[in-house]
Amino acid sequence: MTGKTFTVEEVSKHNKAEDCWIIVDGKVFDVTGFLAEHPGGKKILVGVAGKDATEQFNKFHNAKEVLGKYAKLQIGSIASAGTSPQSRSADSEEQKRKSKFSEEAFGELVPYGDPTWYQDWHTPYFTESHKKFRAAMREFVDREVLPFTSEWCEKKEVPRSVAMKAAEAGWLAGCMGKPWPEEYAGTQIAGGVKPEEWDYFHELILHDELFRCASSGVGGAIIGGMFIGLPPILNFGSEELKKKVCPAVLGGKKAICLAITEPGAGSDVANIQATAKKTPYGKYYVVNGKRSGLQMVLLLTFLLLLSELVALE
């Protein structure tokens, strides 16, 4: 359908939320079905419905990169595209903006929209290894996360398959920090990074790129419980427990969390009132504290971990 041409007047008739077309760089897009998914909210698109939004678009996006992702929304072009003063002005502004950055610049190049080193500012911390990992992370998120974020937010659920794909792509285990847990996650890391190269700056990139999906719920559902719940097992669990839990979690097949909630403390760990005291014979623990029905379930997990710690003594 992209071969079809329209006049500006024809496009101007599609100016409502239920029938929303816009013009960007002489191309006509039907964004009616995209309104709910637009990261900036549907009001922004409805505000330019039926109009040429090139100037507004180029203020916030790298046209080449963004329009390429949503090519399926293009339904045609303007017959006189490239001849209007507005189009020429927008092209000129885009060229000026791009000329400020070197060939090594990465991403949409919106000031402060990405970390400044993405725009090739000097940095003593990020190397070629980090650049390769960054590119691999962005490609994964753009393909496997961004297109589905709104849908998952509506359902309040992220498929387990996403974490499994993240593990296969070689980045899920990266939220464990340094060193890369190759014993349980293998040695294949996204971007061709070597396990011995992995550092906390790679992990920082992981978080920066994943949360470009603009949903803390989606990002948290993929790695939130893991980077809080798994480190205690990696650092203090018995070998038997680590072999049982770590491969499944780092492989994205199972989820894990840290159970710390109680009525008087919430996530304020220092104020937790529950106690765990050994019996006189030192074989068992007696746990006391206020708890809801849900916390009874979480408490069972806690007791299992305690039994492993007892085995260490």
Image (tube, grey):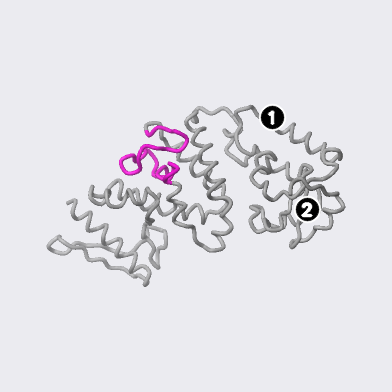
Contact between marks 2 and 1 (CB within 8 A): the answer is: no
Q: Please tell me which residue is depicted at 26% across the width and 62% down the height of the picture.
A: 303
Q: Which of the two marks, 2 or 1, is nearer to us in this view? A: 2
Task: Classify 10 Å Cα crowding around label 2: few (below 14), some (14-19), many (20 and above).
Answer: some
| Residue situated furthest left in the rendering | 281
Report the number of numbered marks.
Answer: 2
Q: Circle 1 sits on which residue?
A: 100
Three-letter residue code for mark 1: Lys
- Rendered position, 259 above or below 52: below
Three-letter residue code for mark 2: Val
User: How far from the left and from the top, in percent, is residue 21?
Assistant: 77, 54
Q: Circle 2 sits on which residue?
A: 48
Give residue 18's quadrant in the image.
bottom right
Horizontal side of residue 297 vs 152, given as left or right: left
Please provide the residue range marked out in magenta.
167-195
Q: Nearer the viewer, residue 191 or 270?
A: 191
Could you give the CA–CA distance between mark 2 and mark 1, rounded to whole angstroms? 28 Å
- Residue 84: mark: none
Q: Nearer the viewer, residue 49 or 80?
A: 80
Residue 101 among magenta residues: no
Q: Please tell me which residue is depicted at 51% across the width and 38% down the height of the picture.
A: 136
Q: Please tell me which residue is depicted at 61% across the width and 31% down the height of the picture.
A: 105
User: How far from the left and from the top, in percent, is residue 132?
Assistant: 50, 33
Horizontal side of residue 22 vs 217, given as left or right: right
User: How far from the left and from the top, in percent, is residue 22?
Assistant: 77, 51
